[in-house]
């Protein structure tokens, strides 16, 4: 992946937006409504009072980058869902479930790279994945070995990131 040794600094507000965005993308894979209380847990305490603005920015990025609409499902229960505005987007090697776990993981990684100014260190990618419960050497039933998935399937089969290196 386009892993760089330099990092684009982010202000704390943008970092909170990025954390919430990552959480929403992962949580969407469960296909259960997302509770506002769950989202607030991903916001640094000092910024929780600014939750509406952080949520607005995260929703705007979901729309712009991933073509997902964050829609309030139940105002009383304060639950939300993500609606895919594109429909299935097939990637070579991911056809068996274009909107499944592999696609979600790929979107997380590409989102992390985008939010860091189109570059990310390998360690940052694995740190983000670790926070989401994905460990480099731990085989997961939903997509197998994460290290192989990232370094072989994603890098070698996805035309947009082909030739950018290996993790």
Image (cartoon, helix red, strand yellow):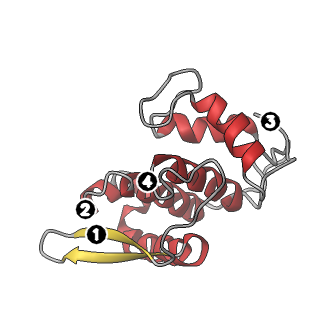
Is there CB contact under 8 Å for labels 1 and 2? yes
- x then y, percent, for residue 138: 51, 22
- x then y, percent, for residue 134: 50, 33
Q: Nearer the viewer, residue 74 or 48?
A: 74
**Looking at the image, is mark 4 or mark 2 earlier in the sequence?**
4
Which disc, if any, is residue 108? Answer: none
**Looking at the image, is mark 1 or mark 2 earlier in the sequence?**
2
Residue 48 horizontal side relative to residue 6, left or right: left
Residue at 53% from the left image edge and 27% from the top image edge:
135
Q: Which residue is mark 2?
A: 33
Q: Which residue is mark 3?
A: 166
Secondary element under disc 2, as helix, strand or loop, is loop
How far apart are labels 3 and 1 at the CA level?
A: 36 Å
**Crowd tier of the residue under label 3, counting other residues whose Cα lies within 10 Å: few below 14, some 14–19, many 20 or above:** some
The quarter of the picture where residue 79 lies is bottom left
**Crowd tier of the residue under label 4, counting other residues whose Cα lies within 10 Å: few below 14, some 14–19, many 20 or above:** some
**Looking at the image, is mark 1 or mark 4 earlier in the sequence?**
4
Quarter holding the C terminus is top right
Is there CB contact under 8 Å for labels 3 and 4? no
Q: Which residue is mark 1?
A: 80
How far apart are labels 3 and 2 at the CA level?
A: 35 Å
Q: Is residue 66 above or below residue 159?
A: below
- x then y, percent, for residue 68: 47, 73
Residue, far top: 137
Foreground tag (3 vs 1): 3
Residue at 52% from the left image edge and 63% from the top image edge:
17
Which disc, if any, is residue 23? Answer: 4
How far apart are labels 1 and 4 at the CA level?
A: 13 Å
**Crowd tier of the residue under label 1, counting other residues whose Cα lies within 10 Å: few below 14, some 14–19, many 20 or above:** many
């Amino acid at each position: 992946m386009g892993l760089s040794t330099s990092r684009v600094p982010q202000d704390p507000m943008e970092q909170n937006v990025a954390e919430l965005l990552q959480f929403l993308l992962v949580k969407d894979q469960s296909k259960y409504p997302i509770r506002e209380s769950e989202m607030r847990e991903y916001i640094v305490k000092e910024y929780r009072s600014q939750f509406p603005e952080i949520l607005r920015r995260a929703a705007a990025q979901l729309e712009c980058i991933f073509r997902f609409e964050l829609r309030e499902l139940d105002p009383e229960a304060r639950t939300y869902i993500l609606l895919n505005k594109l429909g299935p987007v097939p990637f070579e090697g991911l056809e068996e479930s274009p909107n499944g776990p592999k696609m979600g993981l790929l979107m997380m990684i590409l989102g992390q790279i985008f939010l860091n100014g189109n570059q990310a260190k390998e360690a940052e990618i694995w740190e983000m994945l670790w926070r989401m419960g994905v460990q480099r050497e731990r085989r997961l039933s939903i997509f197998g070995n994460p290290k192989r998935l990232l370094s072989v399937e994603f890098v070698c089969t996805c035309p947009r990131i082909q030739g950018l290196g290996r993790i």
